[in-house]
Structure formats: structure tokens, C-alpha cells
Image (cartoon, grey):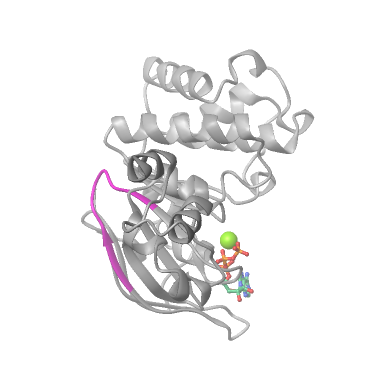
Amino acid sequence: MNIEIKDLRFTYPTGLEALKGISLSVNAGEQVAIVGQNGAGKTTLVRHFNGLLRPSAGSVWIGDWDTSKYSVAKLASRVGYVFQNPDEQLFSRDVLTEVAFGPKNLGYEKDKVDALVKRALSLTELNDQTETNPYDLSPTWRKMVALASIIAMDTPIVIFDEPTTGQDAVNVARIANVIAELKKEGKTVITITHDIDFCAENFERVIALSKGEVLLDGPAREVLGQEEILAQTYVDPPQLTRLGKMLGLKATVINQEEFLNALK
Ligand SMILES: Nc1ncnc2c1ncn2[C@@H]1O[C@H](COP(=O)(O)OP(=O)(O)OP(=O)(O)O)[C@@H](O)[C@H]1O
Ligand SMILES: [Mg+2]
């Protein structure tokens, strides 16, 4: 399912114009990372995809739906959004109820709900926490519950807002695994991240936002190699990219595999 954004502008009630004319399209099955400094407008942008925010001008289409004409509840069948802060998202007494809420609410039959919940819990390694109150889990595991509850909805488009913030290396690897699995299933995955190494390892396309506008958009290698332009939105290229430049490697490398190949 494609996402089509045309000249999207958004002004908060405070008068702050957070998005200043964004146009982009994302094809079905693409894996896209969104990067950019604090306040660049990343969260504001993705909150338009599931109708949490409505354009002040311009349009956002999810497949053949103009988001301005569909409710958040309707859009939830097409776009799953994992909040930046899980505490804004979670509300159930236990992990199982939380994860089952979304698919039940979409009206799926019991067998389908059970299968989706099981898969989401196993992907996030929460199988043995079904009866735990999410608020008794550490903040990092609450994030995994938030992730599971969205994956369980089986939407064609999944958005992660800063999934790796505050996560240790093992959980970052778990999240990367979830993204790889969703990719295999042909889902569109859009991830906001400040973790550039994570971005370089897991995404083929990178969009850099700066002050409510698209600064760069293209294949990860092209975007992450643009050190000077990225600096405008306070993003540093991956460590290996910088090291490769210092070593005088001709090609821009963005991850371990490319770095090692370029050294050979
Ligand atoms: N509810 C709100 N009311 C008014 N202004 C807001 C609101 N939410 C965000 N903003 C402002 O809109 C701009 C864009 O914020 P947004 O949260 O989209 O940025 P972001 O790129 O997600 O930043 P971060 O990396 O810190 O999460 C910022 O200047 C922010 O202060
Ligand atoms: Mg944000």
C-alpha cells in the first residue's frame, strides 16, 4: 500500500509551523528511516499517516484513502503507529490484553486474533510475560510491549517512532529482527531514529528532515554520505562512513559488510 504526501503543511494551535510543505511517496514494502534533529518535525509528520494529526494544507493518502476523510479508527486498519513514548500508548492491566486489543478492535475472528497475538509476542520475546502488568516491566520492555501491540494488528504499514532509544544492544538487535521479519512479509516499515548506525544497518532508504522540510531523501548510502548537508540537521554519518573517508576509501561505505569489502 503506497503513501502519497503532497505539499503537507501543519501548524500547531500555538502558531508553530512544524511542517512546511512536505512531498514524498513511499511504495509498498519499502523500509524507510527518518532522521533529523530534535524538533525537525519527524513525529508530527508520521502522526499524519494514521490521522492523529490532520493537514493544515496539502494531503496525505494511504493507498486510495485521503486521510482527511477517514477516522483514526478506520486508518488503524492500514497504519500501525508505535508511539515514541510507550506510556502514551499502553493502557491494559496485562501484556496479553494489551497486545490482543488492537486485532480484536479491528474485528478479526478469534482464531486470527490468537495467531496474530502469538506471533507478535514471540517476535518481541514476550511469551513468558503475558500476565505481567506492562507498568511492572522496565521502560525498555514496555517499549517492546508497545511494539508487539502494533505488530499484532497486521497492518500493511508499520511506523516506529524512536524504537531504539534507551534500548541496550540485545534489544536493539531484537528490534532489528522484528523489522527484518516485517520486511519479509512485504510490509512497509517507517522508522524514526536518532541511531544512525541502526539506520545504516537496517534501512535501504533514508529521509532527513530539517525544520519541517525534507533536506535529503534517497538510498541510505547516498544520504548518509552527505556529511555537510546532514550537519544542517545535526546528524553525523555512521562511524564507519566517517572512518572510511578518513582512510581514503573511494566508495561511501555505511555498514560493516561494505566497510570490510572496501578494505579487501
Ligand atoms: N503538541 C504540540 N504543540 C505545539 N508544538 C508542538 C507540539 N508537538 C510538537 N511541537 C513542536 O513542533 C516541532 C516539531 O516537533 P516534533 O515532535 O514533530 O519533532 P521531532 O522531529 O519528532 O523531534 P524529536 O526528535 O525531539 O522527537 C517542534 O518545534 C516542537 O516543539
Ligand atoms: Mg519525535
Judging depth in this view, the residue of 69 and 221 nearest the camera is 221
Seen as rendered, the residue at the extreme left is: 64
Q: Is residue 209 above or below residue 118?
A: below
Of residues 178 and 80, the one drawn nearer to the viewer in this rendering: 178
Q: Is residue 65 magenta?
A: no
Instruction: Give whichever of 227, 202 is nearer the camera.
Output: 227
Q: Is residue 153 above or below residue 62?
A: above
168 on left or right of 201 = right
Query: Which of the 4 quarters of the picture holds residue 95?
Result: top right
> Residue 203, position in %: x, y?
38, 47
- Residue 109 in the image: state x and y as whole percent: 37, 21
Q: Say whether residue 2 is left or right of residue 70.
A: left
Find residue 215 and report its horizontal and vertical position in percent.
40, 74
Is residue 98 in view from this perspective? yes
Q: Nearer the viewer, residue 176 or 196?
A: 196
- Residue found 62% across the figure and 34% down from its top: 169
What are the residue bounds of the magenta stretch?
23-32
